[in-house]
Image (tube, helix red, strand yellow):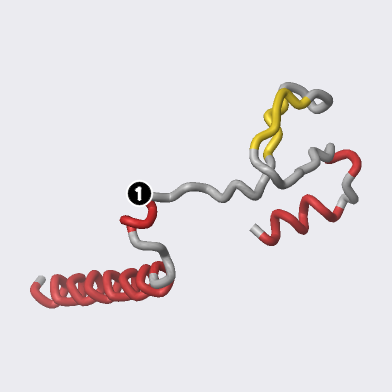
Amino acid sequence: MAQFLRILLSLLLGAVSILSYILRGYSHDLPDSRQLTNYEPSPSVTSPLVFTLVTAACEYTTEKRVVTPLAVLPLQFPKAFLSLQ
């Protein structure tokens, strides 16, 4: 029984070590939480408020985005976009 607990504790410690190493690797370039509380998005992008695919209700900010129906795009485009995500 003691050997089982020792093995279980070793596995748990190893899992925690691996998890902390992974989290440290992914979180080293994240912004500080104090920066996030004062975050204001860049006004350089325009996103239309769309009621339908035909009519845009209004636009805000400065950069123009165009809504393109999926039927117009090549068949490989949605798969390529998803593979980038």
- Determine whether 35 is above or below 24 in the image: above
Relative horizontal placement of residue 66, taking residue 46 as reference (left or right): right
Which residue is pictured at 43% across the width and 50% down the height? 39
Relative horizontal placement of residue 42, taking residue 22 as reference (left or right): right
76, 30: nearer the viewer: 30
82, 1: nearer the viewer: 82
What is the quadrant of the C terminus in the image? bottom right
Residue 67 sits in quarter? top right
Relative horizontal placement of residue 73, taking residue 44 as reference (left or right): right
Which residue is pictured at 88% across the width and 50% down the height? 75
Q: Amino acid at mark 1?
A: Thr
Image spot of residue 29 (x, y percent): 43, 70
- Determine whether 81 is above or below 53 in the image: below
What is the quadrant of the N terminus in the image? bottom left
Which residue is pictured at 21% across the width and 76% down the height? 10
Image spot of residue 74 (x, y percent): 90, 50
Q: Which residue is mark 1?
A: 37
Image spot of residue 24 (x, y percent): 35, 72
Callout 1 crowding tier (Cα within 10 Å): few <14, some 14–19, many ≥20? few
2, 64: nearer the viewer: 64
Residue 66 sits in quarter? top right
